[in-house]
């Protein structure tokens, strides 16, 4: 019997704002390869796919109809906080909205609409990704009686660097408590769930994320040769410019590096609510000349940027996993990862620092920039290291969880 | 007859502290970590001295008292002797007590447990001379046999140290050099040389050193009776059982609760139950037995890992970069005539520094099997590399000072950055000056 999964997410390529959408894509593609039929439900319509509400469309590409995408129209966006969501709605003034105007209400509405989908679909297990879709997963469980698996890619504690919003925290805890099984993307995340949400560790399975290797092996034209031609080295920050990702620590480390070696360019690629603050910080530190803010970068440019960089730094304050860490390695770019990052559980050939230890980061950055052999050794070993990490492996472990849940449901 | 030749290696390096790029030019103390991490040399020395050195020395002393036939051989690196002098003189005293029995031989090696034979023959000779002087000073004996760092060995090494006057040398009884032959005989290097070669019986040695406490091993638990039978089995097809191992095997690698000390205490009695068995030291073995053949080792071997080659220290490009940079500074360091500078440089030649940069077991996500006081090989490299930069800074600074204070000396040999050529090395070899005066000069740095 093929397993049928009703999966709730909140973003999917081509419209993604962070790693979650990419993770859902990689996971569902590998699940479909393993003959798991996935119906993927999204809270908002995806442009370039179909404009209808609650649409049911086939997944583009190679899935032979095994992944269906369903969409519920709403304005949910995965990485918004309640405050920025209100800002976001103001900017949308004039757009007719038939929804209540708070993020929490949006989540509730997604849950209610999910009931109809659950009644309409045939499935064996429910799989919900992160808190925005937990409510939907709970409703689907209520109407179908099928086991609910919630997949935690990040918690409110990670996103806010330890200052959670109470409403979001409660919504997360509601999902974690209602779930029959919890998948955590790292042991680090499992600990967070146990410590901050009071969940019994036996209910949590750690399944690390994978990597889409096809995407990274391709030939692409180089970029940034002008900078490199000047003999300058490039150090990259890539991610949302939010407190979770530690852009401020990156800039302070940059300052330490530049005091020692002015021949380095720091690129900050991404967008987020700390963008202006970060630009100001670079100016205050007197390093604006050596820092380039690029805004969000996606697609092939992202890969080209990794390849151009001499070092990728991920100074996250709290990173449940951090797929971009693997992406950097897959492109032969050495990696400096904060010790507070889950990706460090699957790859070993990286440099690690505490996110707050700016001196240690600067020391390691200068170490790599100053030694060809160190850069090459990290690059070669990192590439070999990351080849073992695949979405097929992740999907295989998820299937074991599905089987287990289905068997428990039958008994 | 089977003679058991116990040889124990005692060594501790001067681990470098977490030396950052910002320390270059400001902090010239490289080995003084005082944290609770495993790079705190004093802390490690105390730990190993308590768990292993004094504890095992007590057992050996008892065995020496109980059995007049019992003998064994040690090699202590200069760096471990120095650390015992500084942090734990009472431990060094227990080694002295062993040597005083007259039945414990001390071998020579490079003072700094270095790879200098591979990179600089003059430095190799200097370090051997330093070691010999140290052993004479501390133990009042003059070594007559030799073992190179981590049993790194080749034909070239054998003939080199033969010329230096040694009677015997140790090497790994690696399968790929022995072929069908047994390690349980005395051998010699090719070409009719007079130096004798003792090859480690790695199966029996590793039964104690590595497998003793392994419950997955079919022969677990290993008893002294069982081990003595294996030794007896050599009778008739061999006359020498070379049990070479790190001394830290006792109490540190195999913890006391594995029963390792009871095993060691009971073993000589069991071995001596067979009337044809006895114990020999390394030089004794070389003098007592006739070599049964020549063993040709054209390429370097060692006792490390399954590869038994140099890849633990020289297997990746960061290791090569670090060691090449180190030896490229040799001429300038020696020209500076600054004892502290020379001593620091020499402490950086210790092989462990390069071992910590090894990445070969660090692969496959198997991080837990890997022990490294620096967390990763890359951090070990970064700290080491920063230190070399500081050493260079000191050399530059020293030269500037030297120009004012010692222009005469500098005008004699104005060859600051010249690479050492083969001719230099040959020249240096011909004119070795291993005088005690030089040794004193180096020790004056302390």
Image: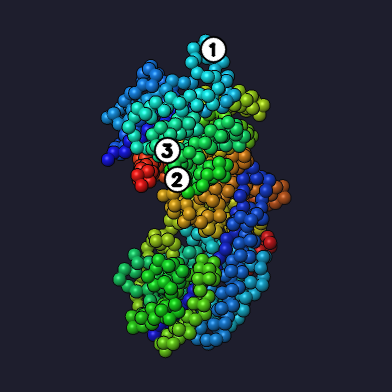
Viewer-closest of A326 and B53: A326
Q: Which residue is mark 2?
A: A205
In the rendered view, would you say B151 is above or below A344? Answer: below
The percent position of residue B172, horizontal first and vertical second, equals 42, 68
> What residue is rendered at 56% in x and 15% in y?
A90
- The answer to whether one can see residue A127 in this image is no
Query: Residue B330, percent across and down?
Result: 56, 53
First along the sequence among labels 3 and 2? 3
Task: Kindly identify the residue that appears in the image at 44 percent across and 87 percent down.
Answer: B273
* Pointer 2 chain: A
The residue that label 3 is drawn on is A148
Q: Chain of mark 1?
A: A
Q: Is residue A65 left or right of residue A256?
A: left
Q: Please name the residue shown 55% across and 44% down the image.
A: A198
Residue B271 location in percent, x, y? 44, 83
Q: Residues within 10 Å of mark 3 (few under 14, many from 20)?
A: many
Distance from label 1 to label 3 (Cα)? Answer: 37 Å
Check if mark 1's residue and mark 2's residue have beta carbons within 8 Å: no
**Which quarter of the picture shows residue A3?**
top left
Q: Secondary structure at mark 1?
A: loop
Which residue does the numbered mark 1 point to in the structure image?
A93
Mark 1 neighbour class, 10 Å CA radius: few under 14, some 14 to 19, many 20 or more: few
Which quarter of the picture shows residue A2? top left
Q: Quadrant of residue B184?
A: bottom left
Parent chain of label 3? A
CB contact under 8 Å: marks 1 and 3: no
């Amino acid at each position: 019997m093929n397993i049928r999964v009703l999966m709730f997410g909140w973003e999917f390529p081509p419209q993604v704002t962070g790693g979650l959408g990419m993770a859902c894509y990689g996971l569902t593609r590998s699940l479909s390869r393993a003959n798991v039929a996935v119906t993927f439900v999204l809270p908002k319509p995806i442009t370039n796919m179909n404009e209808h509400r609650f649409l049911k469309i086939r997944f583009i590409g190679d899935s032979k109809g095994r992944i269906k995408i369903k969409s519920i129209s709403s304005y949910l966006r995965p990485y918004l906080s309640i405050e920025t969501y209100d800002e976001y709605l103001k900017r949308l003034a004039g757009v007719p909205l038939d929804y209540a105007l708070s993020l929490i209400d949006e989540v509730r509405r997604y849950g209610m609409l999910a009931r109809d989908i659950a009644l309409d679909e045939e499935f064996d297990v429910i799989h919900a990704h992160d808190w925005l879709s937990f409510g939907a997963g709970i409703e689907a469980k209520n109407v179908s009686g099928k086991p609910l698996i919630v997949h935690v890619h990040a918690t409110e504690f990670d996103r806010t660097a330890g200052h959670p919003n109470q409403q979001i925290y409660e919504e997360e805890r509601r999902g974690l408590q209602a779930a029959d099984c919890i998948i955590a993307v790292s042991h680090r995340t499992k600990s967070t769930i146990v410590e901050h949400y009071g969940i019994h560790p036996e209910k949590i399975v750690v399944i690390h994320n994978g990597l889409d290797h096809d995407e990274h092996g391709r030939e692409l034209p180089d970029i940034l040769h002008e900078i490199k031609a000047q003999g300058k080295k490039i150090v990259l920050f890539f991610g949302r410019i939010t407190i979770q990702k530690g852009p401020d620590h990156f800039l302070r480390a940059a300052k330490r590096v530049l005091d020692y070696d002015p021949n380095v360019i720091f690129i900050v690629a991404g967008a987020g609510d700390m963008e202006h603050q970060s630009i100001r910080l670079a100016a205050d530190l007197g390093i604006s000349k050596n820092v380039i803010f690029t805004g969000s970068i996606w697609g092939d440019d992202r890969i080209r940027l990794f390849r151009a960089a001499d070092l990728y730094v991920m100074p996250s304050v709290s990173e449940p996993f951090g797929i971009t860490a693997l992406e950097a390695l897959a492109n032969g770019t050495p990696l400096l990862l904060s010790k507070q990052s889950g990706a460090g559980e699957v790859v070993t050939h990286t440099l690690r620092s505490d996110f707050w230890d700016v001196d240690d980061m600067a020391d390691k950055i200068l170490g790599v920039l100053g030694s060809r052999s160190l850069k090459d050794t990290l690059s070669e070993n990192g590439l070999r290291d990351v080849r073992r990490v695949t979405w097929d492996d992740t999907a295989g472990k998820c299937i074991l969880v599905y089987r287990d849940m289905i068997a428990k449901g039958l008994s | 007859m089977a003679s058991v030749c116990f040889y124990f290696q005692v060594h501790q390096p001067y681990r470098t502290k977490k030396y950052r790029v910002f320390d270059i030019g400001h902090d010239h103390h490289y080995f003084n970590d005082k944290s609770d991490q495993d790079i705190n040399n004093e802390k490690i020395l105390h730990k190993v001295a308590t768990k292993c050195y004094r504890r095992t020395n007590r057992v050996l002393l008892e065995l020496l008292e109980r059995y007049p036939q019992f003998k064994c051989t040690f090699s202590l690196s200069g760096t471990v002797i120095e650390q015992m002098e500084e942090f734990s003189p009472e431990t060094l005293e227990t080694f002295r007590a062993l040597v005083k029995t007259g039945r414990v031989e001390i071998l020579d090696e490079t003072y700094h447990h270095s790879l200098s034979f591979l990179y600089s023959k003059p430095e190799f000779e200097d370090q051997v001379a330093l070691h010999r002087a140290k052993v004479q000073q501390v133990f009042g004996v003059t070594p007559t046999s030799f073992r190179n760092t981590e049993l790194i060995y080749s034909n070239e090494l054998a003939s080199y140290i033969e010329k230096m006057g040694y009677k015997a040398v140790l090497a790994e009884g690696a399968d790929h050099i022995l072929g069908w032959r047994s390690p349980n005989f005395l051998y010699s290097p090719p070409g009719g040389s007079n130096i004798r070669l003792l090859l480690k019986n790695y199966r029996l040695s590793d039964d104690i050193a590595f497998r003793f406490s392994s419950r997955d091993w079919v022969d677990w638990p290993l008893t002294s009776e069982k081990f003595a039978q294996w030794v007896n089995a050599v009778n008739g097809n061999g006359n020498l059982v070379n049990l070479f191992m790190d001394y830290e095997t006792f109490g540190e690698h195999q913890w006391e609760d594995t029963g390792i000390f009871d095993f060691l205490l009971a073993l000589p009695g069991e071995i001596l139950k067979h009337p044809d068995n006895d114990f020999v030291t390394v030089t004794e073995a070389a003098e007592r037995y006739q070599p049964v053949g020549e063993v040709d080792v054209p390429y370097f071997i060692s006792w490390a890992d399954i590869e038994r080659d140099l890849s633990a220290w020289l297997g990746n490009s960061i290791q090569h970069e670090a060691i090449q940079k180190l030896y490229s500074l040799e001429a300038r360091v020696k020209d500076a005539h600054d004892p502290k500078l020379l001593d620091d440089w020499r402490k950086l030649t210790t092989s462990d520094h390069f071992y910590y940069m090894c990445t070969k077991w660090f692969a496959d996500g198997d991080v837990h099997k890997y022990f490294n006081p620096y967390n990763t090989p890359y951090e070990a490299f970064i700290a080491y590399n920063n230190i070399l930069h500081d050493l260079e800074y000191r050399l530059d600074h020293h030269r500037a000072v030297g120009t004012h204070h010692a222009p005469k000396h500098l005008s004699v040999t104005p060859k600051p950055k010249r690479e050492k050529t083969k001719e230099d090395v040959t020249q240096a070899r011909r004119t070795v000056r291993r005088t005690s005066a030089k040794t004193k000069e180096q020790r004056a740095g302390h």
